[in-house]
Image (spheres, rainbow, N blue to C red):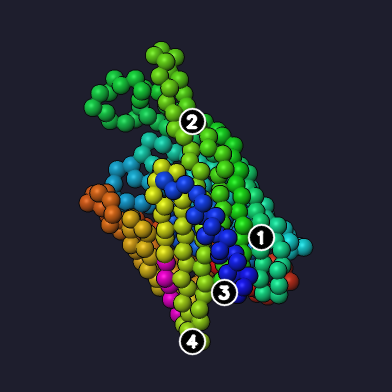
Amino acid sequence: MKTIKIIITIMVLFIGSLTINAQQVPMYTHYMYNTLVVNPAYAGSRDALTLTALYRSQWAGFDGAPVTQTLTMHAPLSNEHIGLGLSVLNDKIGPTNNTSVFADFAYIIQLSKKSKLAFGISAGANMFQANLNTLLLDQQADPAFQNNINNHITPNFGFGAYYSRERFYAGISVPSLLQNNYSQTNQENGNTLISNEQRHYFLIAGTLLNLSDNLAFKPTALLKVTSSAPAEADFTASFIIMKKLLLGAMFRSGDAVGLLIGLDLTEQLHLGYSFDWSYGLETFKYNNGSHELILRYDVIFPGKKQIHSPRNF
């Protein structure tokens, strides 16, 4: 417990030292199952080759609303001190589309028989596209929207730390350290179209409390901080029934509330769905909520009959 308190204190000081201010990265209600996208140190944390696919349709019924797909895979190497992963993300918002591919590397330290600390790095590239001439404008002749930004590829890398026990985890990360610019100059009038990436900082934590033989309580949290926008916090409280069925609720500060349901179809396969409803934005008047599906499958290595701890996160 002393080690946990020290780690949490470091995280609070780390987050508190940052300038809090626009959200550019996708949001996930199932962030606790999509950890590799935000923290490369998570790679290899499960004793299996873990494949996770997520689909999110945000603000259903709202024209140009965000639609996001992610696919991640990761596994420990045979020496159990190295974890490798791969993250692929596609995010479409209105006329813009961003696709990223990142490779993840984690070095895992066995602090004790029941706890681990991992440090991770990721490296990859983003491909940004903006079909600006598809927009309907009050002035269709506006020169700033006559050209598209196509296949603008920029490299990036990230860093993270992840502490885990069988029933507790916590991590800090910066998935994209570089703040790249996307720009294109119109040769006729000299106008330049510019979009700037913002660096995001993440703090994640969660635990599992056994209330009885057939009932467990699983609270989790995610804090996201970036410049030019308020800090955003997600809190999720779930009950796990008979070690198979998950029922939960979520709250996202200043944005949404929602419900989650999940089912372990087998020991290796988990299926989850969530619905969240925006309460703090004017968009709630014009959309039918946000839907999210997640599918996770653990490929058990030959010679192993089951997945060993940590297997709860």
Residue visible at 56% across and 48% down in the picture = 175
Query: Range of the magenta residues?
Result: 236-243
Distance from disc 4 to disc 2, alpha carbons, whole Å, reads 53 Å
Q: Amino acid at mark 4?
A: Ser
* Residue picked out by circle 2: 182
Tell me which secondary structure the magenta stretch mostly adopts: strand
Look at discs 2 and 1 and give the one toward the viewer: 1
Look at discs 4 and 3 and give the one toward the viewer: 3
Frontmost residue, 14 versus 144: 14
Determine the secondary structure under disc 3: loop
Q: Which mark sits nearer the N-terminus, 4 or 3?
A: 3
* Residue picked out by circle 4: 212
**Mark 1 burial class by Cα count in 10 Å: few <14, some 14-19, many 20+:** many
* Label drawn at residue 167: 3
| Most distant residue in the right direction | 79
Viewport quadrant of the N terminus: bottom right
Residue visible at 30% across and 58% down in the picture = 277
* Residue picked out by circle 1: 118
Relative horizontal placement of residue 291, taking residue 8 as reference (left or right): left
In percent of width and height, residue 311 lies at: 59, 71
In percent of width and height, residue 296 lies at: 53, 63
Q: Which mark sits nearer the N-terminus, 1 or 3?
A: 1
Distance from disc 4 to disc 1, alpha carbons, whole Å, reads 31 Å
The answer to whether mark 3 and mark 2 are in CB contact below 8 A is no
